[in-house]
Image (tube, rainbow, N blue to C red):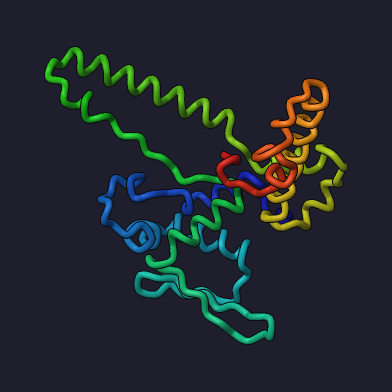
Amino acid sequence: MKVMTIQTYDALIQPFMLTVEYFHGKASDKLFSKYLLCDKHLLTCMITAIQMMIPYKEVKALFHRLAFTLNDANENEVCFVLDDDNFDEFCDIVLLVNAKKRVVVEKVPDKILQIKDPEKRRYWLETWTTTQRGRQKFNKENSLHLWDALNVCQFCGEYIPIDEMMDWTLWRVMNCYNAKLGLKSYDDNLSMALVSGDTERINGDYHWYKQLTLKDSGVN
């Protein structure tokens, strides 16, 4: 996290958030080989982001794949290949660690496009478009950013100096973020349970162990 700003890093991992729908492609299209490898900017962002997560000695752009030369624990050279077969799984890991989700491209419902009356179709299309803009604005305003997670790690519960966290991996940051939120949630539920006598607040999914479990569904 010392190497570049958070905003820059967020931009670098965007290729892992894209989908075929984002490029208005067909469901059968290969996202990695057909779109990402052919876009110089997205390819550069993707390679740079991978270098931040998996330091490599060399990268080669081969036919429909990327080959990364790494060093294993014994300093032996090994090759990691990223291609159409493993790219989706790799994206899932990257997005989980960075608390991100894939871009969702909303399509106009067929029932609106099938309205025969031009005036009614235009009215419902404008209504749908306005609603989508509102949702996008809401999601943007309420999305989790890395600096939000850092603030929680630093000030929620036991204080952790920001200089110390600058040496952390992103996985450690997000794990600490989820753990601290879970512990705070459990403490709040425990306080309410002691007052109300409602033990359900500290059992089942509310139990402290469950609250400390890393869940990608709880991070946007």
Instruction: Name the image quarter holding the C terminus.
Output: top right
Name the foreground residue: 215 vs 132.
215
Percent from the top left, x then y, of residue 157?
A: 84, 39
Res. 206 image quadrant: top right
Residue 148, can we see it? no
Q: Is residue 175 above or below residue 218?
A: below
Percent of width and height locating residue 76: 63, 87
> Looking at the picture, how far across and down is residue 54, in whole percent?
61, 67
User: Where, by quadrant of the figure, is residue 28 drawn?
Assistant: bottom left
Can residue 105 be seen by looking at this rendering?
yes
Q: Residue at x 54, y 51 (%)?
A: 95
Out of 69 and 86, give the one closest to the viewer.
86
Image x and y of residue 109, in percent: 26, 29
Tell me: residue 159, above or below residue 199.
below
Q: Residue at x 47, y 49 (%)?
A: 17
In this picture, residue 208 sits left or right of residue 18: right
In the picture, the quarter occupied by the N terminus is: bottom right
Q: Is residue 166 left or right of residue 115?
A: right
Task: Please report the residue visible at 56 percent of the width from the left and 42 percent of the height from the top.
Answer: 217
Determine whether, in the image, residue 39 is placed left or right of residue 172: left
